[in-house]
Image: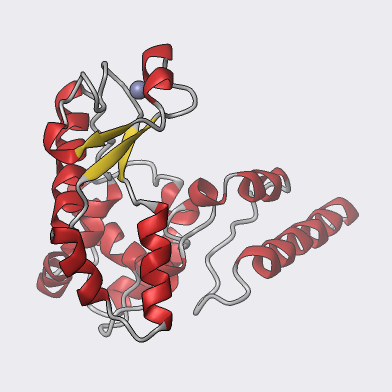
Amino acid sequence: MKLFDCLKKAQQHAIKKQIISKFYADYPEEPYISKDRKAEWIEQATTFPKTAVVPRAMMRRYADGLLPGHVYMLYWLKKYTNKKVPDYFEYKYGIDFEKERAFLIENGFLDSTNKPTEKGEKAIEKHNKVIENHAAPKPDVSIEGISKKILKARDSIQKNGFTEYIFIANRNCCSICADLDGQRFPISKLNIGVNAPPMHDRCSCSIAAYEDSKEYEAWLDSLDKGGTTKQREAKKKR
Ligand SMILES: [Zn+2]
């Protein structure tokens, strides 16, 4: 081996070691890190762990010995032939496509033409959640979409026995919303676009139950004296 190749290999090994110890030390299995992984990835993953780091659940095997990445591979291979293998098998599922393809053939999930066998088809069906979760839908930011979310929150606030809510403006929303921030309204008078979000398209504000701090402290006090949550609920409904 040439000296250059040798140095490169040593450097790659160091990057891999650093990634494993920094992000995956307590994972059930180490995710695959290819020789193309750049040192910059570490910086990126430190800043945006949610989008860069392989989630722990991806490295936990099901009872049948498959990883979520295997399931997606089966689905992907069923759908495509001769297509370039996407990076996400490494970056999202933490698996080495070629190595795991051999594993799937060896274990009877794939046939020699790289298509799922009956066993493979059953695995796709059984772990369908993996396919569903692959392209998680983007949050609906239309007025209808946000309204639905707010009405759901209202129902839950009411169900929990609260009679008032406060408007919580997102810091980067708009001046209309900023004026409403922290204002208190009866939950029965909640009116979308008037005193509750969404005030406009893409409004990122929300609501929360209003909890009277005096009442809350009185309740904590009563707990100290042996009261129960039930008594508090009963008092609220009066
Ligand atoms: Zn807003």
Q: How many marks?
A: 0
The picture quadrant where one finds residue 236 is: bottom left
Give the answer, above or below, for where 60 lies relative to 53: below
Q: Nearer the viewer, residue 37 or 208?
A: 208
* The residue positioned farthest toward the right in the image shown: 3
- Horizontal side of 27 relative to 38 (left or right) equals left
Residue at (56%, 51%) from the top-left corner?
A: 49
Residue at (40%, 45%) from the top-left corner?
A: 86
Residue 126 position within the rendered picture, expressed as x and y whole percent measured from the top left: 14, 71
Residue at (59%, 69%) from the top-left corner?
A: 24
Task: Judge whether residue 102 can be spotted in this image.
Answer: yes
Residue 99 position within the rendered picture, expressed as x and y whole percent measured from the top left: 45, 67
- Horizontal side of 116 relative to 2 (left or right) equals left
Give the answer, above or below, for where 146 lies relative to 74: above
- Horizontal side of 212 relative to 55 (left or right) equals left
Residue 78 position within the rendered picture, expressed as x and y whole percent measured from the top left: 18, 54
- Horizontal side of 100 relative to 142 (left or right) equals right
Q: Where, quadrant-wise, is the C terminus in this rendering?
A: bottom left
Residue 98 position within the rendered picture, expressed as x and y whole percent measured from the top left: 43, 61
Displayed-image quarter of ligand 1: top left
